[in-house]
């Protein structure tokens, strides 16, 4: 058994290329695990730079110098952010404030609707079931109130952190765009010299992640716009607020769409009560998600993520359990990285086996 295990180790881990790749992966995982919460602005800047790099490359293709192209794209990015802050954020915050004001009346209407259900459907629902639901709701609402109180007490620190992020992230985005080659050359000096296999994996993963981020960005905008138009057409309250979260929910495949089904249904129930409008809203939301999952996402991400749905769900469970919300968001890119590593590793082993057989 010991000799078998030793042969297995020698066969799969004796290659310096494999060891270099494993070292880089372990180092990256340790940095993310221990310092990930402190490096959120850094990761956000990298993602934004990924999105803007395509525009910079196109401007370079038009014979514009790298620094000038980076400056133009960066200024356009800042203008877009300012337009969002001035035009979009006030509308969104007003809907959040309106929702918080309407919560007490919604709860009263919800209670009345639940109490009337045993009278309308005595064969299906009893008063005991309604009382259990109300007691459970009271407990959960009390917990939510405590969380909101603790959040409000920490809001000043959150505002300061947000202001710092709003300064640091754009600065890092600009330097990532302007000095891309210098930063990559500097980072390569800290990497092992024997990293051909790591370079092959990085080339594949880099292209996959770039296409994934861009495709997901387009998907978020399209789903956001389509859901907003749908909710306005249905005359659903808080259409803008709900549509923003529906758009962002596509970042978490399968789970995000299911999770957003409940707040959309609850808002419709609070607005119309036990009515066919709620059913229409549920059907419309399901159709929207089906169109996104079966038409839009495959069209935008065709050939980008060649992972089975079971592998995607498994990645969401694992990375979500490790890193919470950010693990859910980055589950697919991380799964793509692991898939590329395994693919390159197996391909290298097969080529060595074929070489030995040929000899």
Image: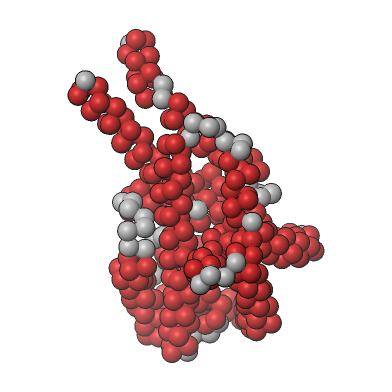
**Rendered image quadrant of residue 340:** top left
**Rendered image quadrant of residue 341:** top left
Residue toward you, 172 or 302: 172
Residue toward you, 268 or 69: 69
For image coordinates 32% across by 13% down, the residue present is 4
* Residue 348 located left or right of residue 225: left
The image position of residue 193, as x and y in percent, is 53, 32
* Residue 15 located left or right of residue 93: left
For image coordinates 76% across by 61% down, the residue present is 164
* Residue 231 located left or right of residue 8: right
For image coordinates 60% across by 64% down, the residue present is 66
> Compared with residue 222, is residue 232 higher up or lower down, i.e. above or below?
below
The reply to whether residue 247 is visible in this rendering is no
The image position of residue 255, as x and y in percent, is 43, 59
The image position of residue 24, as x and y in percent, is 53, 36
The reply to whether residue 71 is visible in this rendering is yes
For image coordinates 37% across by 76% down, the residue present is 288
> Compared with residue 4, is residue 357 higher up or lower down, i.e. above or below?
below
Residue toward you, 333 or 293: 333
The image position of residue 351, as x and y in percent, is 28, 31
Split into 4 quadrants, where in the image is the N terminus? top left
């Amino acid at each position: 058994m010991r000799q078998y295990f030793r042969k297995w180790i020698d066969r799969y881990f004796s290659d310096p290329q494999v060891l270099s790749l494993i070292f880089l992966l372990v180092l990256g995982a340790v940095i993310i695990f221990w310092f990930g919460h402190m490096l959120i602005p850094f990761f956000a800047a990298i993602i934004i730079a990924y999105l803007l790099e395509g525009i910079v490359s196109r401007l370079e293709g038009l014979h514009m110098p790298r620094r000038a192209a980076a400056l133009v794209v960066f200024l356009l990015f800042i203008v877009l952010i300012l337009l969002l802050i001035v035009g979009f954020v006030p509308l969104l915050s007003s809907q959040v404030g309106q929702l918080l004001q309407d919560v007490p009346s919604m709860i009263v209407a919800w209670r009345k609707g639940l109490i009337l259900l045993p009278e309308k459907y005595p064969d299906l629902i009893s008063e005991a079931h309604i009382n259990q639901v109300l007691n459970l709701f009271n407990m959960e609402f009390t917990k939510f109130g405590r969380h909101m109180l603790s959040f409000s007490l920490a809001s000043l620190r959150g505002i300061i952190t947000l202001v710092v992020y709003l300064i640091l992230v754009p600065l890092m985005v600009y330097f990532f765009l302007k000095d891309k080659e210098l930063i990559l050359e500097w980072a390569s000096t800290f990497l092992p010299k024997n990293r051909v296999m790591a370079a092959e994996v990085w080339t594949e993963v880099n292209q996959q992640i770039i296409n994934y981020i861009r495709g997901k960005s387009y998907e978020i905008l399209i789903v956001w716009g389509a859901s907003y138009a749908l909710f306005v057409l249905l005359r659903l309250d808080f259409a803008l607020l709900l549509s923003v979260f529906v758009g962002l929910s596509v970042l978490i495949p399968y789970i995000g769409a299911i999770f957003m089904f409940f707040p959309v249904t609850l808002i419709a129930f609070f607005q119309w009560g036990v009515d066919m409008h709620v059913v229409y809203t549920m059907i419309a939301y399901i159709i929207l998600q089906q169109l996104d999952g079966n038409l839009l996402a495959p069209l935008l991400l065709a050939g980008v993520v060649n992972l089975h749905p079971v592998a995607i769900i498994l990645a969401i469970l694992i990375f979500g359990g490790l890193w919470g919300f950010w693990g859910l968001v980055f589950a697919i890119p991380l799964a793509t990285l692991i898939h590329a590593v395994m693919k390159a590793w197996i391909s290298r082993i097969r080529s060595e086996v074929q070489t030995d057989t040929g000899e």
